[in-house]
């Protein structure tokens, strides 16, 4: 085969990039068209909710405790000599609810669930199970993608609320036991500048992140080619693309809500 | 009746099908022979609408299915059953759930009738009392049989077999061949099987077609195939490395 020159490689990669965007857009269109049929197999969605939500709790719990803890330590360090410590709860609360809770939960879930979705669907693809669904006149989008997408957009906000709560507890624990601030001071600070908009902004982020994780997992799973190596590559791509898109959309949503 | 007219398909620079023409009559079993990687499975996937051709038409009872959109295609697929090379059983489901999936999802029967039908189909393929096992707990031959039970569960008019005997020991391969013959006789199904197993082809085929270099280069009954003097057919039938078909392509 003829060796490709630099411009051919760049051209191919550019085409591949835009082709990918188009394919994801078509997948999203198919998801929304198929969405009303989800109740025909709602047990598939509840199974996915269990996998995505309940089974992720221990991981989110550990991540969130330490996230809350470190945000308290960092805030206390930055406050020293300049800002009164009664604002420590405010800083921890804002950081957790607006940013750390949704983003870190999403990144952890992308690693666990996004990779799982891509690996499962990728294996189904290479073992012709997805073709088998089609030959039984069953739409793989309705059967495989919609349940995962729905559980993503429902369960990530639930996990984020759990994460916010645990992270604030972590921050409170560190403040009381290590920084010598009373729980009364911390909680008062938490309430001081609390706006419902902060919480809603964080939850909107979580909905979008959940959609991104499920869509990327399904898209890369469906695109899998080859055997075990192909499944491995799809899994990696699903996690990488989810993470990058989470961070980009985080900026966009933050600009809309808080910009 | 299925009629394939001048079918072309390429994947990138690899031209797999280069003008395939083939007719399969109602109730007939046609075996498409060909070397591994010659495009046999690609041909089957076109017939059931899993792949779209670059050029050409496929008529099922006079209707060109290459023009069908999703809804019409799913309707058409309910008339087909397909046995995959690796069985393609859903590993998250039990044997019973695999076989019953089409019936349940299309709500073709009430639940008690579905259970009855699944038992009947599993008995037909010689597998009873295995309903609760998962595919990972089955042998290769058992998986093929479950795949077969699933393919015929919705009483299809057409069944496509992708390498039905590949990877099986000779005894199990013959048992599968017997099963395909029984299915044809009992259910008068129109079947297309693709394989490189010449013994299996002689046993199950009403007609054999040879796919070579992207085209059907020979068609005939098993008797005509055996006595053919076409050098390509002779080389394939005798399984010789010497001849017009190059071992390395």
Image (cartoon, helix red, strand yellow):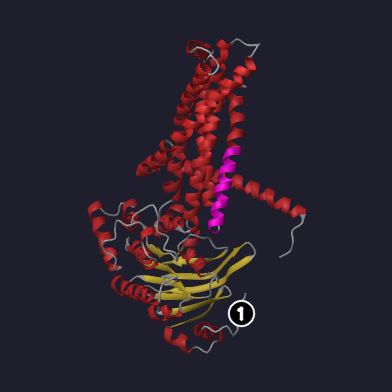
| Image height of B80 relative to A175, above or below | below
Q: Residue A61, image x and y in percent?
A: 46, 31
Chain letter of disc 1 in the image: B
In the rendered image, the quadrant that contains the C terminus of chain B is bottom right
Pick the residue in front: B30 or A159.
A159
Q: Residue at x 58, y 75 (%)?
A: B213
**Residue marked by disc 1:** B246
Q: Is residue A249 left or right of residue A177?
A: right
Q: Is residue A243 magenta?
A: yes
Magenta-drawn stretch, dominant element (helix, strand or loop): helix
Task: Answer left or right for B17 relative to B3.
Answer: right
- Residue A93 lies within the magenta run: no
Q: Position of residue A79 (x, y in %)?
A: 63, 15
Q: Residue at x 54, y 24 (%)?
A: A69
Q: Nearer the viewer, residue A173 or B175?
A: A173
Q: Which residues are magenta?
A: A226-244
Q: Position of residue B157 (x, y in %)?
A: 35, 66
Residue A84 can be seen, yes or no: yes
Q: Is B196 located above or below residue A34 in the figure?
A: below
Quadrant of the image occupied by residue B193? bottom left
Residue B134 position within the rendered picture, expressed as x and y whole percent measured from the top left: 35, 56
The image quarter containing residue A92 is: top right
The kind of secondary structure element at disc 1 is loop
How many callouts does the rendering have?
1
Quarter that holds the N terminus of chain B: bottom left
Structural crowding at the residue carrying mark 1, measured as other residues with C-alpha within 10 Å and reported as few (<14), some (14–19) or many (≥20): few
Asked if residue B110 shows in the view, the reply is no
- Residue B149 versus residue B25: which sits nearer the camera? B149
């Amino acid at each position: 085969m003829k060796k490709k020159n630099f411009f051919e490689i760049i051209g191919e990669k550019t085409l591949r990039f835009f082709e990918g965007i188009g394919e994801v857009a078509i997948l999203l269109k198919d998801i929304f068209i198929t969405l009303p049929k989800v109740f025909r197999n709602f047990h598939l969605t509840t199974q996915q909710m269990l996998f995505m939500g309940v089974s992720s709790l221990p991981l989110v719990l550990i991540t969130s405790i330490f996230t809350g803890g470190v945000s308290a330590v960092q805030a206390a360090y930055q406050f020293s000599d300049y800002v009164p410590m009664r604002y420590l709860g405010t800083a921890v609360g804002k950081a957790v609810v607006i940013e750390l809770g949704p983003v870190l939960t999403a990144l952890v879930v992308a690693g666990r669930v996004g990779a799982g979705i891509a690996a499962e669907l990728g294996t189904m693809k290479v073992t012709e199970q997805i073709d088998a669904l089609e030959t039984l006149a069953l739409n793989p989008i309705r059967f495989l993608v919609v349940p995962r997408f729905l559980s993503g957009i429902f369960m990530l906000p639930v996990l984020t609320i759990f994460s916010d709560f645990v992270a604030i507890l972590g921050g409170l624990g560190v403040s009381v036991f290590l920084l010598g601030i009373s729980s009364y001071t911390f909680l008062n600070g938490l309430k001081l500048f609390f706006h419902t908009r902060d919480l809603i902004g964080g939850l909107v982020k979580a909905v979008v992140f959940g959609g991104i994780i499920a869509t990327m997992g399904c898209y890369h799973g469906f695109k899998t080619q080859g055997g075990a190596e192909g499944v491995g590559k799809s899994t990696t791509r699903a996690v990488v693309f989810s993470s990058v898109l989470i961070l980009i959309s985080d900026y966009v949503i933050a600009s809309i809500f808080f910009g | 009746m299925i009629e394939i007219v001048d079918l072309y398909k390429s994947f990138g620079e690899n031209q797999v099908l280069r003008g395939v023409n083939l007719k399969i009559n109602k109730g007939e079993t046609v075996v498409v022979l060909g070397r591994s990687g010659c495009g046999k499975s690609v041909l089957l996937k076109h017939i059931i609408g899993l792949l779209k051709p670059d050029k050409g038409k496929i008529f099922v009872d006079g209707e060109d299915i290459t023009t069908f959109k999703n809804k019409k295609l799913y309707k058409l697929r309910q008339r087909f059953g397909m046995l995959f090379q690796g069985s393609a059983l859903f590993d998250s489901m039990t044997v019973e759930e695999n076989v019953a999936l089409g019936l349940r999802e299309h709500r073709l029967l009430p639940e008690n009738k579905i259970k009855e039908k699944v038992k009947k189909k599993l008995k037909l393929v010689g597998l009873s009392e295995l309903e609760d096992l998962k595919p990972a707990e089955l042998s290769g031959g058992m998986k093929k049989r479950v795949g077969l039970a699933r393919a015929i569960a919705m009483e299809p008019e057409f069944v496509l077999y992708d390498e039905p005997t590949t990877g099986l020991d000779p005894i199990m391969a013959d048992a599968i061949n017997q099963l395909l013959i029984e299915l044809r006789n009992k259910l008068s199904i129109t079947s297309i099987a693709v394989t490189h197993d010449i013994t299996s082809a002689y046993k199950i085929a009403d007609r054999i077609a040879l796919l070579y270099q992207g085209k059907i280069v020979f068609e005939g009954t098993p008797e005509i195939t055996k006595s053919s003097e076409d050098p390509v057919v002779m080389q394939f039938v005798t399984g010789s490395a010497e001849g017009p078909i190059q071992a390395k392509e």
